[in-house]
Image (cartoon, helix red, strand yellow):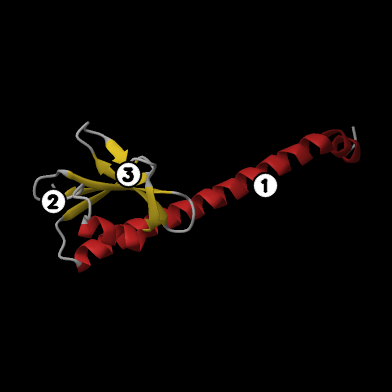
Amino acid sequence: MEWASLCKQDAPRLQEWSIRHFLSKRQLEVEDDEKMRKDSLLERIEAYNEAHGGGVLTRRVNKGYSLYQKRNHKPIARFRPTGKEDEVEILWWSHRDRWETVGDFGGIIMPLDEALDYVREDPCGFFWR
């Protein structure tokens, strides 16, 4: 069999493979962008902590960032990225021993810098117990 006829027979399969390869490559690029953005969120949280005297441990866990008191390892807050720029949902460690949203009518969502200030100021008394 000639090369040209082999290529004609395999053309649909090769085209399907190249489309799948392109899509998976594009998906990987998007995932890499998200990882880079999320890693930058971790760096910003740690920089904020250092700028305000330290005392907080930050861990990247299950699609979010958990903050703990360094001296006794008690949970402080959790930031769950929303996927919109640097917006995060703020969660608190409840009396039920789990992360819960702040507020009765849904979570509080704000840019990371504002969220860090909110947790530091603790207007509701949820975080620094």
Q: Which residue is mark 1?
A: 22
In the image, 64 versus 124, the foreground residue is: 124
- Residue 41, quarter of the rendered image: bottom left
The three-letter amino acid code for the residue at tag 2 is Lys
| Spatial CA span between label 1 and label 3 | 43 Å
Q: Please say whether residue 43 is visible from this viewpoint.
A: no
Mark 2 vs mark 1, foreground winner is: 2
Residue at screen point 58% across, 46% down: 27
Numbered circle sitting on residue 55? none
- The residue carrying pointer 2 sits among few (fewer than 14), some (14 to 19) or many (20 or more) residues within 10 Å by Cα, namely few
- The residue carrying pointer 1 sits among few (fewer than 14), some (14 to 19) or many (20 or more) residues within 10 Å by Cα, namely few
> Where is residue 118 shown, x and y percent of the image?
27, 58
| Spatial CA span between label 3 and label 2 | 26 Å
Q: Identify the secondary structure beneath mark 2.
A: loop
In the image, 82 versus 29, the foreground residue is: 82
Q: Which residue is mark 3?
A: 103
Mark 1 vs mark 3, foreground winner is: 3
**Does label 1 or label 3 sit earlier along the sequence?**
1
On screen, residue 83 versus residue 126, left or right, reads right
**Does label 2 or label 1 sit earlier along the sequence?**
1
Residue at screen point 20% across, 49% down: 127
> Where is residue 65 shown, x and y percent of the image?
31, 48
The three-letter amino acid code for the residue at tag 1 is Phe
Q: Which residue is mark 2?
A: 70
Residue at screen point 55% across, 47% down: 28
Mark 3 vs mark 2, foreground winner is: 3
